[in-house]
Amino acid sequence: MFNRVDHIGVAVEDIDASLELYERDYGMTLVHRETVTEQGVEAVLLDVGENHIELLAATGPETPVGKFIAKKGPGMHHVAYQVDDIEATLASLKEAGLKLIDETPRIGIRNSRVAFLHPKTAGGLLTEIVQPAQVH
Amino acid sequence: MFNRVDHIGVAVEDIDASLELYERDYGMTLVHRETVTEQGVEAVLLDVGENHIELLAATGPETPVGKFIAKKGPGMHHVAYQVDDIEATLASLKEAGLKLIDETPRIGIRNSRVAFLHPKTAGGLLTEIVQPAQVH
């Protein structure tokens, strides 16, 4: 069902300060940077093999990531699995009894199609399903 | 430096109950099960492409994972990156100013060699470096 870990989403207070760790110290390559206004985040993707690290900074304190950081501090925010057919995956997971945050896919970073699963039925993890715009 | 995400470590209250989610609902394949007495954990590895999910259950309440679950509940525990040369990686990270929990590698699951980085200098994430016993 899942091809691989697509990315790990990490909440950070400041993207550029965090890039000192991920680019300079860890040697990861920055491959994308995008502000997703409707979600209130500035996001960057770094390559680590075929997986990615997605750094997420809030555009304001009242956004989901802003509230997350105020409550829990910077750190792991979500895990995302890559799939070929997001509709089929969501149908299967719904049939299995999982609670979907997004009943239908929406557009995510780099024009991927994404949907989130509720942590309550996903083992305590905010979990994202990603169908990339291009297989990569 | 890092070849890929080796695994995501997930703290769970009960391994077998959690396998209903990861094996049955997510379709991941269980590939290893081990009790690491010195760390006070029962651990299983599931394949997701070339990455793994590592489920961790405490063998008692006074273990690190037992304390983690008491404080934060089940959920993401750590991220692990796979490397070819763990000594060279640790030397580089130490030179960069990162705080190492393990100054020298120790034996981890499936006879891998592992070392942890302190969350304080690793962006708030408990971070593990893994050199597998066999390249896989």
Image: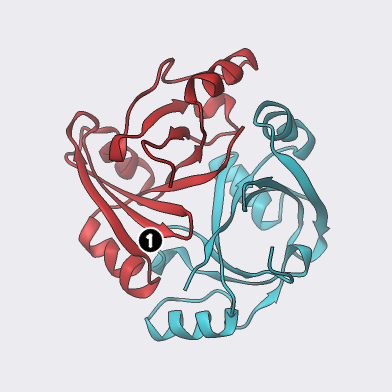
Chain colours: A cyan, B red
In this view, B128 is above or below B89 = below
Q: Please provide percent x and percent y for residue A1.
A: 47, 74
A108 lies left or right of B101: right
Which residue is found at the position 62% from the left and 15% from the top? Answer: B97
Secondary element at image label 1: loop
In this view, A52 is above or below B37 = below
Q: Please provide percent x and percent y for residue A121.
A: 39, 69
Image-quadrant location for residue B30 = bottom left
- In the image, B53 versus A15, the foreground residue is B53
Which residue is found at the position 17% from the left and 33% from the top? Answer: B37
Q: Please provide percent x and percent y for residue B38.
A: 20, 28
- In the image, B64 versus B50, the foreground residue is B50
Q: Please provide percent x and percent y for residue A94.
A: 45, 83
Q: Which three-letter amino acid code belongs to the residue tagged 1? A: Gly
In this view, B14 is above or below A107 = above
A82 lies left or right of B111: right
Q: Please tell me how crowded label 1 is: few (under 14), some (14-19), or many (20+) other residues with Cα within 10 Å.
A: many
Quadrant for the C terminus of chain A, please: bottom right
Which residue is found at the position 71% from the left and 54% from the top? Answer: A62
Write down the residue under mark 1. Answer: A123
Which residue is found at the position 39% from the left and 45% from the top? Answer: B72
**Label 1: chain?**
A
Total count of labels: 1
Image-quadrant location for residue A38 = bottom right
